[in-house]
């Protein structure tokens, strides 16, 4: 976020270094049900980000003192794999991953019907296989699909995407260069049925106008991500249905 | 911050009052408690501040020592912010390494200071690529009655503003004030029921569903934000928070001078 660079991130035609316009997100690929042991799982690619999410539960809550007698708790663990970034990342939780795990858990809490499973834990594991800016949004997007894939009752699915600022332009879904040399980053996650915000962070430097524009862009794009999430779940279950039909014949 | 049990009658009382636009301590929804700041209260620190917001009390100290820069920023000083929620401050706090609440708190304060460029990192360079000043800000909650975020931010910022680089102690030239460029101020709001209240006290925090911390700089530009809590906030509520963060931020800047 230093912003000190000679690198041109947005050219005079408003084109970005990866050929996108300001309001375009990177290619997004979502697949549901990609692991066999987990109760639910999802794989998400957003540009060069590659993210896996797995859900176990509702199951007995450990450690037990965390149990809540009136509802289930969501315990998310966000982890970057050692080879996911250019310098090797030292394995194990650091302060960044603890914070991200916390805010993703809180974002999911709004949509999961946790009151149905008192004392239980719903464990969400997010593994970043390859990082290229926007991993917390990719992780949350994957986690929502994995929860739905696990058959956990939810009010809605949570899509997430970031907006930001680079070269003085408000841009959607920053890539690594734009994130490193840009001036601001605003990850946003919403409940699509109501447009309520369940995750919001910001760092950098933005005026009110720029921030409002970034949030509007991100909320709009969240709805696009939402369609892809639903599509992934439909593909997964229509494939299942076909298999079941085949067994019967 | 913790899962204390609160009686239903008190919870309902707070919620009912809020429906009439009142708070249990008589404040308006956009009103801070009394803010008191004492700086340079610790002589062994290179900068320090003790901040009270109502009954919430936080102390922050700065230590500045020479060290090696990060390889990718050879001519920039290093800034690190840590926070501890020590058992002294509240019965629900336990000793041991910082948990997720303390880590989030430290990182939100850190983000406000770092992203606003409050400390001129280039001016902390001693020998490019070899030696720079490393600036450690450590925050301790002493008494928790809600809104540790703003109290911690204020304590850290006030401690940095009074900090002195101890050149003489390390034979690196004269002592000089830490180069400061601006004053980032955070304003935290809690959503209780359907009302947003500035500077929540402990009880209000307990029954709140969501929290939003917004850090602004001297120009009223946004430098850091963090939404917390299991609930959600609407776009209109976000807009109110942003307006009040600018307004309250300017007021707090006046208080601390």
Image (cartoon, rainbow, N blue to C red):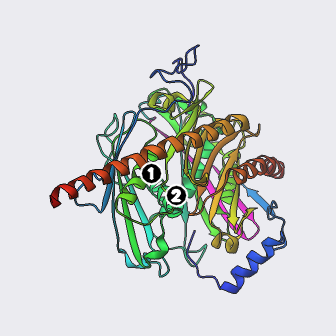
* Disc 2 + disc 1, Cβ < 8 Å: yes
Which SS does the magenta portion mostly show? strand
Tally of numbered tags:
2
**Observer-nearest residue: B80 or A16?**
A16
Which tag, 2 or 1, sits closer to the chain's start? Answer: 2
Can the viewer see residue B134 in this picture?
A: no
Q: Is residue B162 left or right of residue A236?
A: right
The subunit letter for the residue under badge 1 reads: A
| Distance (Cα) linking label 2 and label 1 | 8 Å
State the residue lying farthest toward the front: A249
Mark 1 Cα-neighbour bin, 10 Å: few <14, some 14–19, many ≥20: many
Q: Position of residue B156 (x, y in %)?
A: 65, 52
The label number, if any, that marks residue A140 in the structure image = 1
The subunit letter for the residue under badge 2 reads: A
Q: Quadrant of the N terminus of chain A?
A: top right
Q: Is residue B164 magenta?
A: no
Q: Quadrant of the C terminus of chain A?
A: bottom left
The label number, if any, that marks residue A30 in the structure image = none
Q: Which residue is mark 2?
A: A107
Q: Are marks 2 and 1 on the same chain?
A: yes
Q: Secondary structure at mark 1?
A: helix
**Observer-nearest residue: A126 or A192?**
A192
Q: Residue at x 72, y 38 (%)?
A: A208
First to last magenta residue range: B44-69
**Observer-nearest residue: B234 or A61?**
B234
Mark 2 Cα-neighbour bin, 10 Å: few <14, some 14–19, many ≥20: many
Can the viewer see residue A186 in this picture?
A: yes
Q: Position of residue A87 (x, y in %)?
A: 33, 35
Q: Is residue B57 magenta?
A: yes
């Amino acid at each position: 976020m230093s912003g000190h660079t000679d690198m041109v991130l947005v050219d005079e035609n408003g084109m970005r270094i990866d050929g996108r316009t300001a309001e375009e997100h990177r290619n997004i690929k979502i697949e549901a049900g990609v692991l066999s042991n987990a109760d639910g799982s999802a794989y998400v690619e957003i540009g060069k980000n590659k993210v896996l999410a797995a859900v176990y539960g509702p199951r007995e809550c450990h450690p037990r003192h965390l149990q809540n007698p009136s509802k289930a708790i969501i315990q998310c663990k966000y982890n970057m794999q050692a080879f996911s970034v250019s310098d090797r990342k030292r394995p194990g939780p650091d302060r960044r991953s603890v914070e991200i795990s916390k805010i993703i858990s809180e974002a999911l809490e709004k949509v999961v019907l946790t009151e149905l499973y008192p004392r239980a834990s719903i464990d969400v594991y997010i593994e970043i296989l390859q990082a290229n800016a926007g991993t917390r949004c990719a992780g949350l997007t994957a986690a929502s699909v994995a929860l739905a894939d696990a058959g956990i009752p939810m009010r809605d699915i949570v899509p997430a995407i970031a907006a930001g600022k680079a070269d003085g332009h408000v841009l959607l879904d920053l890539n690594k260069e734009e994130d490193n040399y840009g001036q601001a980053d605003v990850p946003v996650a919403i409940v699509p049925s109501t447009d309520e915000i369940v995750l919001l962070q910001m760092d950098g430097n933005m005026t009110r106008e720029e921030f409002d524009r970034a949030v509007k862009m991100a909320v709009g794009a969240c709805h696009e991500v939402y369609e892809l999430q639903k599509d992934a779940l439909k593909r997964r279950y229509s494939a299942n249905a076909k298999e079941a039909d085949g067994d019967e014949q | 911050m913790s899962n204390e049990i609160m009686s239903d009658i008190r919870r309902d009382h707070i919620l009912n009052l809020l429906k009439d636009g009142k708070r249990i301590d008589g404040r308006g929804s956009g009103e801070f408690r009394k803010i008191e700041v004492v700086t340079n209260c610790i002589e062994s620190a290179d900068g320090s501040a003790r901040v009270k917001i109502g009954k919430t009390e936080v102390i922050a100290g700065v230590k500045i020592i020479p060290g090696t820069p990060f390889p990718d920023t050879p001519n920039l000083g290093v800034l690190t912010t840590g926070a501890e929620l020590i058992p002294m401050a509240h019965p629900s706090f336990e000793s041991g390494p910082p948990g997720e609440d303390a880590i989030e708190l430290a990182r939100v304060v850190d983000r406000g200071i770092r992203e606003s460029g409050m400390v001129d990192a280039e001016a902390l360079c001693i020998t490019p690529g070899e030696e720079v000043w490393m600036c450690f800000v450590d925050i301790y909650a002493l008494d928790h009655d809600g809104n540790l975020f703003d109290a911690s931010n204020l304590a850290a910022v006030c401690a940095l503003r009074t900090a002195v680089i101890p050149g003489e102690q390390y034979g690196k030239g004269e002592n000089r004030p830490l180069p400061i460029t601006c004053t980032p101020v955070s304003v935290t709001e809690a959503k209780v029921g359907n009302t947003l209240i500035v500077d929540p006290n402990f009880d209000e925090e307990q029954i709140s569903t969501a929290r939003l911390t917004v850090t602004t700089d001297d120009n009223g530009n946004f430098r850091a934000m963090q939404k917390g809590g299991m609930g959600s906030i609407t776009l209109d509520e976000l807009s109110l928070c942003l307006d009040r963060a600018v307004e309250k931020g300017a007021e707090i800047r006046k208080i601390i001078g």
